[in-house]
Amino acid sequence: MVAYAAHTLVTFGGVLNTAADVPEIWQCGIRVTDTVGGGPLADHDAYLEGIHGPLSTWYAAPSNAGLPATSELSWVKANSINAAGKYAEPTTHVYDYPAPVAGGLAANIAGVLPDILCLAVSWTSAKKRGKSHAGRIYLPNYFLPSLTPGSMRIMADWNRQWAAKAAALLALIANSAVHAVPIIASPSGPTAQITGVRVGDVIDVQRRRKDAYKESYSVLPFAPA
């Protein structure tokens, strides 16, 4: 039976790749509590007012660990989650950006990947195993240079840069007009405060970002000789 501890879910997302003929969408979520002890944030609208600007700046920042300019951040939400893992309120608290925020990394590096490929960003905690000991998000960071052509491993140091970028994301999620503590939460398990970031150097895949495309098939008849 699902039984989440009460908390707030912060989600943000937009268009994955505006250059695609059939653009997909993306979304990431980070769970927070009002204190280390737990509980949802007291004022979600005030919280969104405090983070939407820093989140926009973070998304548009130009660097190697940057989001592709063909991706967009369109909205950010913050809502209480009940024991069933659903929104606890009838009102959805959301900030819609007046204009989509484009990522800051232009398409000028070798190894632009298909949209569904990315580096996974993992959150760690003081727990070594079991429920809520770790979590992850899949940012739309598909501009990644492979170590060699066709390799699944990226060039040296890029994962370190992405770990620093992810740590900056956690900092802005936590430090706002309404204080928030980033956590990992699992159903039927305790929450754990996020205490670290881990990013590997092997390209991962997020299959849910292959939904909008409809395949065009080539069909041939076959008969045994």
Image (cartoon, helix red, strand yellow):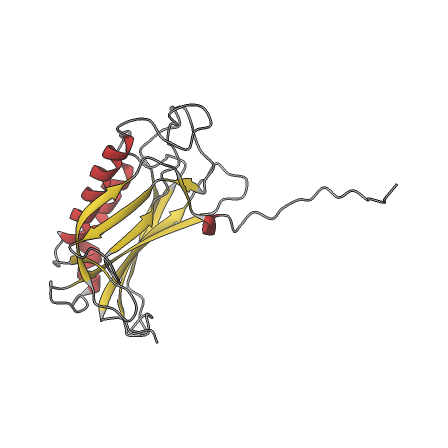
Which image quarter holds the C terminus?
A: top right
Name the foreground residue: 127 vs 53: 127
* Left or right placement of residue 215 versus residue 72 in this view: right
* Left or right placement of residue 223 versus residue 149 in this view: right
Name the foreground residue: 1 vs 59: 1
Where residue 118 appears, as percent x and y from the top left, is: 38, 40
Q: Is residue 170 above or below residue 180?
A: above
Where residue 93 appears, as percent x and y from the top left, is: 28, 64
* Left or right placement of residue 117 versus residue 124 in this view: right
In the rendered picture of this protein, how many numbered marks are placed on residues?
A: 0
Where residue 104 appears, as percent x and y from the top left, is: 31, 33
Which image quarter holds the N terminus?
A: bottom left
Name the residue located 41 percent from the left edge and 23 percent from the top edge: 148
Q: In this view, does 19 lie above or below 131?
A: above
Name the foreground residue: 66 vs 116: 116
Name the foreground residue: 109 vs 70: 109
